[in-house]
């Protein structure tokens, strides 16, 4: 889709919104984020790279139907547009989304990591992000915006039973610059296009996966949940051709379509059974049981089944000891069939003190510990929140100490965190400041500053209006 077509489409939406303004309920927000990235810290005054990012969220409700638009703009122009429709048809709730976005590539990831080594974590930094969209197929990058996906969720509630169906139609080749998810250590997207020279042909389509041309697939997630008379909640989800998370620049969704569920797998010499256009593959089954009460202990159980993989499960037990402390114990297993534990964590909260103990191998040996003490300084006059957080590693000792100070005066909130870290001796690692101002009338202002031994880091300034 060319920028001109998308611009006309968005203009029609805005005009239509103004046409029904007298009868519709209009709400939303506009946020402007400014990032200042110093090119170095070699002198007192240096040049800065500036990145302007704007986000307009608009919801128009008319006759029980809510039309939504989530629009993102950057230095390169329109970056994404998420158009939605929400309504209720009796007991049936409908939530429909169309997602359009500009494809991006990255020409320089942080030093020491590369895509081939599987070491990329998080998104590519803004000054290295390059639009690579080609809308007319002439092999020249013209920064075109393309169709990414359609998501439609239907939710039906009958007699206390909730049935939800999420259908996904998605471009499985759309570029993703998220890299590896830091928490899971896995690449959430199946194909990352880091090349900034080769265009991504958003206006074309083929059946070849993992290339620079859109390939569309279908996925579906069916969820059923309900509650017993004793208050126990049971929920189960079946995912077909869908798993993980999906990212575009600045937005993400749970579940993305498996690239194996595309037309390319149905057009070979051996067609699919019954003449199906795409395969329908079982991805995973999840079962959650929460709210089990046993002797003052609340237990929640989450279990996941995946083909050709061991059954994984997590058990969370929460209780209170003599109203002095709340204790939460989490048992995680990557292979419940052999009764092995992969991780055990214990969280203890008592007043201003919290303690977390983590056993990464499930061998009843504490590998990590986190302790936090929170107090209020001068509570009667000009109070301030102060917290000390300590991190200890087995065999190493104390490796990190954070000191946080929070001050609130009227509509102004100021937070500052100073971190000391090191394997042998703690040394100053960083100091950050965060300022938030509520100007009233839906107007807000915020700023974030950070400093390290090498100099000033990225500064973020945000302005927001809610209406």
Image (tube, rainbow, N blue to C red):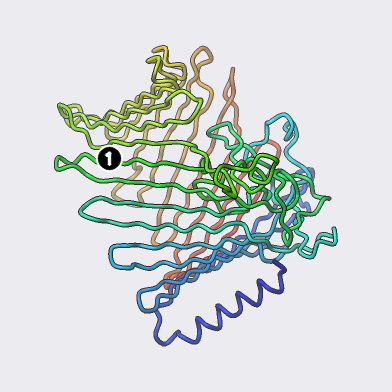
Instruction: Please identify the quadrant where the N terminus is shown.
Output: bottom right
The answer to whether residue 78 is above or below residue 122 is below
The answer to whether residue 384 is above or below residue 351 is below
| Residue drawn at (67%, 48%) of the image | 173
Q: Nearer the viewer, residue 422 or 176?
A: 176
| Residue drawn at (40%, 81%) of the image | 24
Residue 143 % position (x, y)? 76, 62
Q: Nearer the viewer, residue 235 or 353?
A: 235
Residue extending farthest front: 274
Does residue 174 appear left or right of residue 321 in this picture? Answer: right
| Residue 457 can be seen in this image | no
Asked where in the image residue 269 lies, by quadrant, the reply is: top right
Residue 450 % position (x, y)? 61, 45
Residue 210 % position (x, y)? 71, 43
| Residue 352 can be seen in this image | yes
Residue 458 % position (x, y)? 66, 49
Instruction: Please identify the quadrant where the C terminus is shown.
Output: bottom left
Number of marks in picture: 1
């Amino acid at each position: 889709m060319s920028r001109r077509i998308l611009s006309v489409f968005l203009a029609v939406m805005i005009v239509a919104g103004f046409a029904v303004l007298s009868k519709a309920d209009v709400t939303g927000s506009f946020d402007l984020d400014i990032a200042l990235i110093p090119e170095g810290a070699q002198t007192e005054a240096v040049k800065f790279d500036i990145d302007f990012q704007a986000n307009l969220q608009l919801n128009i409700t008319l006759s029980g139907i809510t039309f939504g638009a989530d629009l993102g703009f950057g230095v390169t122009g329109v970056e994404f547009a998420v158009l939605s429709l929400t309504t209720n048809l009796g007991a049936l709730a409908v939530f429909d989304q169309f997602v359009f976005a500009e494809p991006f590539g990255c020409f320089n990831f942080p030093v020491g990591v590369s895509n081939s080594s599987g070491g990329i974590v998080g998104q590519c930094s803004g000054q290295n992000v390059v639009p690579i969209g080609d809308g007319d197929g002439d092999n020249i990058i013209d920064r075109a915006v393309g169709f990414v996906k359609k998501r439609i969720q239907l939710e039906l509630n009958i007699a206390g039973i909730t049935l939800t169906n999420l259908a996904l139609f998605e471009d499985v080749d759309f570029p993703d610059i998220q890299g590896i998810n830091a928490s899971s250590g896995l690449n959430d997207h199946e194909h990352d296009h880091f090349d900034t020279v080769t265009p991504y042909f958003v206006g074309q389509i083929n059946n070849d996966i993992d290339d620079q041309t859109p390939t569309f697939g279908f996925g579906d997630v069916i969820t059923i949940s309900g509650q017993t008379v004793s208050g126990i909640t049971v929920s189960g989800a079946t995912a077909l051709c869908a798993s993980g998370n999906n990212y575009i620049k600045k937005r993400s969704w749970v579940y993305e379509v498996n690239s194996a569920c595309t037309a390319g797998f149905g057009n070979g010499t051996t067609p699919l059974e019954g003449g199906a256009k795409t395969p329908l593959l079982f991805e995973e089954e999840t079962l959650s049981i929460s709210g089990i009460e046993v002797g003052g202990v609340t237990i929640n159980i989450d279990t996941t089944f995946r083909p050709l993989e061991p059954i994984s499960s997590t058990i969370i037990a929460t209780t209170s000891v003599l109203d002095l402390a709340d204790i939460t114990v989490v048992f995680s297993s990557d292979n419940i069939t052999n009764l092995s534990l992969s991780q055990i964590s214990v969280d203890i909260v008592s007043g201003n003190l919290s303690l977390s103990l983590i056993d990464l191998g499930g061998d009843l040996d504490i590998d990590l510990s986190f302790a936090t003490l929170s107090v209020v300084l001068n509570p009667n006059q000009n109070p301030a929140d102060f917290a000390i957080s300590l991190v200890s590693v087995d065999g190493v000792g104390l490796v990190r100490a954070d000191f946080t100070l929070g001050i609130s005066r009227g509509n102004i909130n100021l937070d500052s965190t100073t971190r000391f870290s090191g394997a042998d001796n703690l040394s100053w690692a960083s100091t950050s400041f965060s300022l938030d101002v509520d100007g009233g009338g839906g107007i807000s202002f915020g700023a974030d500053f950070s400093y390290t031994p090498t100099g000033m880091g990225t500064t973020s300034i945000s302005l927001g209006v809610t209406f």
